[in-house]
Image (spheres, coloured by chain):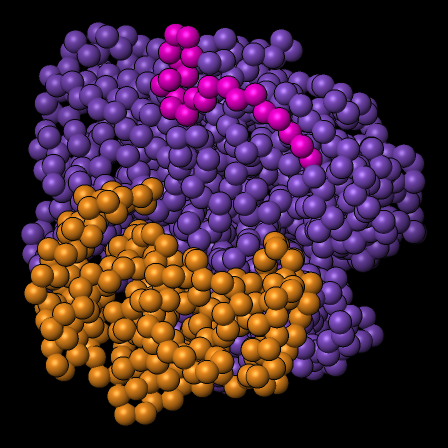
Chain colours: A orange, B purple
């Protein structure tokens, strides 16, 4: 249960609170996930007054503040349509008004549209204190084992010069996907393929100078991807279809 | 901590604890228009307010986060225009449009939808339909199918732009295309022709098309047949505290239940001492603390047609979610803490999850308690809750005479009612030591009768109040949680409130019965069905609630439609066998359609496959064998919900007209069998398909369902109508008021309806079996006719006493119209004059009437359901593009509320077709616990919905009505599956049509 609430006015103040050893203290973005936490007892640090709700484009870099809401992201005109779509598909209209980008990264699972495309875009997380950078891939790999009091994500940094395509399968247009394939392709030819729709987080299939080998890697990666929502055989087969559609779309 | 908020423009300073949600804080301060859907992740949106201009869900936001922000709630939007001497600006145009457009059914999500609309229109007064759908997509509605809310918002936008909009009821005759100009790829949609709409944005599509089959008994009517505004719409659109949980009582405790984490076990040891010792805990109850009384939770008439196999608390648990202990505490947090302090040691027992395993020799026995009370052929030693064996005609002879025999096995899933308002109950002792149960129920009188022995109270010491209900769909035809609160009130002497969480709704409530169905059909090469047999293995879960009657209806309705043709029509050969078995899953129960959707999935899939195999037109094949007017309902002499069956002739069958009009609207002849239409230009992986299903339902249970009504006249000539009938959002209070108004010659606004309070209203069996308009409506007509007779007598006397030289008028010559009692010569006295005369002036009497009605027949409504789909043949994804339903429900009392029933029903059935199912792991743990995983359709993903009414006149009802509420559940899933078959050849025998199932079927072709 939430036993303390803070709304700091500065990043330093927020970080200091978050680095306390007792009680457990966690950041509070929109509240969509944290506000209903029943255990353990914890303090929350509301980030709404920290000015982290801006999206700034600088050349090929887009800097998305940690508390930018999913609706802000979906509406921002400087983004690729596929990223906007992923933000829109992430959750319902009302929840998008409160759910933040950083919150979605911290709590999203393998069926997350947004995590899948951000991973394809090789998004980088900026942490306070110290403006430390961490790739989203590294973060997701260690998300379950890192200590709670590590600090605070302040920004998500994206390159805006990569083309992005993604395809998904769901039971209905607004249902959560059971399979997602996202492909990001940079002008250099660098290509990242990510698959989602199951598990705790989407997974990187390849990051290479081009898309060669993606099909084989995807098939191998999905060998054991069966769960209560779809079989591995289905995902293996249909992921190839989705990958093909993404690649054709470039 | 202290927070400062601006709510509806007024500054407030509140003390809130850090953990309190904004939802809780708002409701604690009296903002009851903010509703609670019980969801854990904000997925329903019923609790939405506008925060700094955008809609947000207050259940997933701390009150502290709102500090310094501006909030708009429904309480600030608009009010009733006339509050005595105080006049207001009235309802907001959005609210007014929602009311007029029939966009409000149960009304539980209405405040949230109104606020979402306001947020949109405050920013954009020219929204497209797509933008409106997106704007309200954060709010789940289980009643309407979203069509009317969307149209209402577009209408409100036009009004706010200053445009003129036509009245809803000024719709001209709607077009029925009889033929299309030619084969084209894109068959045009025929839109309703409207009056002088100034702009397309103002056009409204809330009125259904109505095709009237004229009948000599049908007369012109003033109120019946009109799209009257729902009698509860004004309060619901204001978010008034009308629901069970919208009150607070001094000293009220909060109840919680400890649910079993295991599917089958004995409670070896239970220790509640730590929980009882927790400060703030008022009571903890286990099976050791309360009387052991076997009962059935099924809200049905006496005697309940099923076994008594349930106990408020037992020493054994039979599914994950079963009850272990009850707690009452000062707060929800304390109650939840107390649950964690209860130590339980379980002795695990073998688990049965597959219904086929339940019948095997040596299977573990789920109900081994000695005090189990059998009903009919229930046999707990064989895990058998019910058994049905019906043979009509000579089935084996029919098979022998067939040219072909078709056999196949089908399966339908377990699905959940998902009413947005969860189960809510408040219990308390009144000043007379009578127990009051204020509950969200469809069956208040059954609740009282069933709970009396369980609680050790006589019926006369229990009062059940049903306030407004936020949807039920059968889920509240169950005495599900009332006993929990009642036991705790008895234990503590204090008021107790128990509100189910959404997780409890998915894990510890009721569902539709999942079934495995084997069909065997004999057919001659010309398409004549010679015999038809169905065997059903029905999974009732851990308890047998509704097991017999739901499963009986699977055959009684679905197997009655196709009787055969020629000599077989005169003497159909039909077999329906069923075994209803216990498993260690959440119990099944009543769900809109009540077994019939389970029956029409196999029947209509089977008919489609037979027709295609024989090379017959699927529609002609069905109509050739379908039952016709004047024929005997084949099951009427064989089965009647566990009671004595009696023969019933079906007088009205509008099925052929339904087919003709439905085909025309959807453009069947231009699309079916047209290869060009089936292709999607530029998208070789997509295929279009079109499908049909024909269905029938019932209207009430003959010789059993009874409704009562009383009506009394007030000083101003208005009337109080008291009915036991239970409006669960369907609009039944409104159609009952319309019938009373029709008889009494007054506007509907002069009928004040009070429904469902066991102390104050006559008995009614409750809201189920599509019976209210037909049964309760006939009771209302009888009561109103009694009152009308007294009015005519008094009016004649008053006119004759005037001494104005006119000839004496006889009471029977007087017509009641426009609030007047009118003599043939034009003289009249007003209702108000009659009321004052009767109550105060001369030969005083209370003009009133009472009536009750039970029917000897259950006239079936019929329908033709059409579906259009697009299938991705590489992924198996099915997109339903359009649903058209043509329905014969007899005379339509209120076209807007009736079409709302069809649209909402089709939408629920759409989920049954493509996405809804409850699944369990090998230990019986449920996969679905919320609306994230259990997906129900949102506004921004809906197909186009169209409703056509084919009005026959049912002679067994004074206004010619039949049922409308359940039939839309029956045909969508098979029509969609038939359309998928048409699109790509994927032949799916078990719904829902998930992408993987379609993909597998395509690979097996």
Q: Is residue B917 above or below residue B823?
A: above
Q: Residue A191 location in percent, x, y? A: 16, 72
- Residue A217 appears in which quarter of the rendering? bottom left
Camera-side residue of A153 and A131: A131
Camera-side residue of B55 and B405: B55
Q: Residue B592 location in percent, x, y? A: 48, 38
Residue B355 belongs to the span the image colors magenta:
yes
Image quarter where the C terminus of chain A lies is bottom left
Residue at point 16% right, 39% down? B1001
Camera-side residue of B537 and A178: A178
Residue lying furthest bottom: A59
Count numbered badges in the picture. Answer: 0
Image quarter where the N terminus of chain A lies is bottom right
Camera-side residue of B911 and B838: B911
Residue B763 belongs to the span the image colors magenta:
no
Residue at point 13% right, 46% down? B984
Q: Is residue A28 left or right of residue B622?
A: right
Q: Is residue B937 left or right of residue B739?
A: left
- Residue B882 appears in which quarter of the rendering? bottom left
Residue at point 41% right, 16% down? B358
Q: Residue B557 location in percent, x, y? A: 39, 27
Q: Is residue B630 left or right of residue B606?
A: right
Residue at point 12% right, 34% down? B612
Residue A214 visible: yes
Q: Residue B811 location in percent, x, y? A: 73, 42
Q: Is residue B479 left or right of residue B701?
A: right
Q: Is residue B369 above or below residue B168?
A: above
Residue B800 visible: no
Q: Over which residues does the magenta segment extend?
A: B342-363
């Amino acid at each position: 249960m939430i036993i303390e609430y803070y709304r700091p006015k500065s990043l330093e103040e927020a970080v200091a609170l978050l680095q306390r050893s007792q009680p457990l203290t966690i950041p509070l973005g929109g509240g969509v996930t944290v506000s209903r936490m029943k255990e353990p007892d914890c303090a929350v640090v509301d980030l709404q007054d920290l000015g982290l709700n801006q999206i700034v484009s600088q050349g090929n870099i887009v800097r998305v503040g940690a508390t930018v809401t999913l609706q802000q992201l979906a509406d921002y005109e400087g983004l690729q349509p596929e990223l906007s779509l992923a933000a829109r598909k992430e959750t319902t209209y009302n929840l998008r008004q409160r759910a933040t980008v950083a919150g979605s990264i911290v709590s999203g699972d393998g069926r997350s549209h947004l995590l899948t495309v951000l991973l394809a875009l090789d998004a980088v997380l900026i942490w306070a204190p110290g403006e430390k950078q961490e790739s989203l891939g590294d973060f997701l790999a260690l998300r379950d084992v890192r200590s709670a009091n590590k600090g605070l994500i302040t920004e998500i940094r994206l390159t805006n010069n990569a083309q992005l395509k993604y395809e998904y399968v769901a039971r209905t247009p607004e249902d959560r996907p059971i399979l997602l394939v996202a492909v990001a392709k940079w002008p250099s030819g660098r290509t990242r393929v990510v698959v989602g729709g199951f598990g705790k987080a989407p997974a990187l299939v390849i990051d290479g100078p081009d898309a060669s080998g993606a099909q084989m890697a995807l098939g191998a990666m999905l060998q054991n991807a069966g769960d209560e929502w779809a079989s591995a055989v289905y995902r293996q087969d249909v992921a190839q279809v989705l990958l093909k559609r993404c690649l054709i779309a470039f | 901590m202290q927070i400062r908020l601006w709510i509806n423009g007024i500054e407030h300073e509140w003390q809130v604890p850090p953990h309190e949600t904004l939802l809780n804080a708002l409701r604690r301060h009296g903002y009851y228009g903010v509703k609670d859907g019980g969801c854990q992740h904000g997925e329903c949106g019923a609790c939405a307010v506008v925060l700094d201009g955008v809609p947000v869900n207050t259940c997933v936001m701390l009150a502290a986060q709102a500090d310094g922000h501006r909030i708009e709630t429904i309480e600030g939007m608009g009010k009733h225009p006339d509050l005595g001497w105080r006049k207001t600006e009235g309802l907001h145009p959005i609210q007014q449009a929602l009311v007029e457009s029939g966009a409000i059914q149960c009304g539980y999500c209405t405040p949230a939808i109104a606020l979402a609309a306001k947020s949109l229109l405050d920013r954009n007064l020219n929204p497209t339909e797509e933008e409106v759908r997106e704007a309200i997509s954060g709010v789940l509605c289980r009643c309407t199918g979203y069509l009317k809310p969307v149209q209402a918002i577009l209408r409100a936008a036009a009004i706010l732009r200053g445009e003129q909009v036509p009245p809803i009821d000024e719709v001209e005759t709607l077009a029925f295309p009889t033929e299309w100009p030619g084969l084209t790829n894109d068959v045009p949609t025929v839109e309703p022709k409207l009056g002088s709409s100034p702009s397309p944005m103002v056009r409204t599509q809330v009125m259904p098309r109505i095709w009237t089959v004229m009948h000599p008994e049908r007369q012109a009517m003033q109120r019946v047949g009109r799209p009257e505004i729902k009698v509860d719409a004004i309060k619901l659109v204001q978010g008034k505290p009308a629901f069970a949980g919208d009150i607070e009582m001094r000293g009220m405790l909060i109840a919680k239940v400890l649910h079993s984490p295991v599917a089958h076990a004995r409670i070896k040891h239970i220790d509640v001492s730590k929980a009882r010792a927790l400060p703030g805990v008022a009571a903890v109850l286990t099976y050791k603390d309360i009387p052991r009384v076997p009962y059935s939770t099924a809200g049905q008439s006496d005697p309940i047609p099923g076994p008594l196999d349930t106990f408020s608390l037992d020493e054994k648990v039979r599914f994950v979610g079963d009850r272990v202990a009850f707690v009452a505490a000062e707060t929800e947090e304390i109650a939840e803490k107390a649950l964690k302090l209860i130590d339980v040691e379980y002795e695990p027992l073998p688990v049965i999850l597959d219904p086929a395993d339940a019948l095997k020799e040596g299977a573990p026995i789920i109900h081994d308690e000695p005090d189990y009370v059998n009903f009919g052929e229930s046999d707990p030693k064989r895990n058998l809750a019910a058994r049905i064996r019906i043979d009509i005609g000579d089935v084996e002879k029919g098979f022998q005479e067939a040219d072909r025999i078709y056999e196949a096995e089908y399966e339908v899933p377990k699905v959940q009612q998902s009413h947005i308002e969860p189960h809510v109950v408040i219990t308390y002792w009144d000043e007379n030591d009578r127990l009051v149960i204020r509950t969200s129920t469809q069956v208040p009188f059954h609740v009282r009768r069933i709970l009396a022995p369980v609680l050790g109270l006589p019926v006369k010491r229990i009062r059940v109040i049903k306030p407004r209900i936020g949807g039920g769909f059968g889920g509240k035809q169950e005495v599900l949680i009332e006993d929990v609160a009642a036991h705790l009130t008895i234990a503590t002497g204090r008021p107790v409130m128990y509100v189910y969480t959404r997780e409890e709704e998915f894990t510890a409530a009721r569902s539709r019965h999942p079934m495995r169905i084997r069909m065997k059909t004999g057919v001659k090469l010309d398409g004549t069905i010679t015999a038809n047999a169905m065997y059903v293995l029905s999974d009732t879960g851990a308890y047998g609630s509704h097991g017999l009657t739901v499963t009986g209806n699977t055959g009684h309705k679905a197997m009655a439609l196709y009787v055969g043709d020629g000599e077989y029509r005169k003497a159909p050969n039909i077999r329906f066998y069923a075994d209803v078995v216990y498993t260690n899953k959440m119990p099944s129960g009543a769900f809109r359609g009540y077994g019939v959707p389970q029956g029409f999935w196999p029947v209509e899939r089977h008919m489609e496959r037979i027709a295609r195999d024989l090379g017959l037109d699927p529609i002609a094949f069905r109509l050739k064998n379908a039952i016709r007017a004047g024929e005997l309902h084949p099951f009427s002499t064989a089965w009647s919900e566990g009671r004595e069956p009696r023969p019933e002739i079906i007088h009205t069958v509008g099925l052929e007209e339904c087919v003709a009009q439905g085909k025309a609207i959807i453009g069947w002849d231009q699309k079916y069998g047209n290869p060009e239409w089936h292709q999607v230009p530029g998208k070789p992986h997509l295929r279009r398909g079109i499908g049909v299903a024909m269905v029938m339902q019932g209207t009430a249970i003959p010789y059993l369902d009874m409704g009562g009504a009383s009506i009394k006249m007030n000083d101003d000539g208005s009337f109080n109508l008291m009915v036991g009938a239970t409006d669960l959002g369907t609009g039944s209070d409104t159609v009952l008021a319309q019938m009373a108004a029709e008889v009494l010659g007054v506007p509907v606004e002069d009928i004040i309806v009070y429904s469902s309070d066991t102390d104050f209203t006559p008995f009614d069996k409750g809201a189920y079996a599509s019976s209210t308009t037909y049964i309760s409506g006939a009771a209302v007509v009888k009561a109103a006719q009694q009152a009308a007779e007294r009015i005519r007598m008094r009016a004649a006397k008053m006119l004759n006493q005037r001494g104005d030289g006119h000839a004496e008028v006889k009471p029977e010559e007087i017509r009641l119209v426009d609030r007047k009692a009118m003599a043939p010569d034009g003289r009249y006295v007003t209702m108000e004059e009659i009321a004052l005369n009767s109550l105060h002036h001369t030969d005083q009497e209370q003009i009133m009437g009472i009536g009750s009605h039970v029917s000897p027949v259950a006239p079936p409504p019929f329908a033709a359901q059409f579906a259009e789909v697009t299938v991705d043949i590489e992924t198996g994804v099915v997109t339903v593009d359009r649903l058209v339903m043509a329905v014969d429900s007899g005379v339509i009392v209120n076209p807007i509320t009736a079409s709302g029933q069809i649209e909402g029903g089709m939408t629920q059935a759409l989920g049954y077709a493509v996405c809804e199912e409850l699944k369990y792991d090998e230990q019986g743990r449920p996969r679905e616990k919320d609306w994230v995983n259990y997906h129900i359709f949102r506004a921004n993903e809906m197909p186009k919905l169209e409703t056509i009414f084919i009005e026959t006149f049912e002679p067994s009802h004074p206004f010619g009505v039949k049922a409308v509420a359940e039939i839309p559940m029956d045909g969508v899933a098979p029509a969609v599956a038939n359309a998928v078959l048409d699109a790509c050849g994927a032949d799916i025998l078990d719904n829902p049509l998930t992408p993987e199932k379609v993909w597998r079927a395509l690979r097996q072709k």
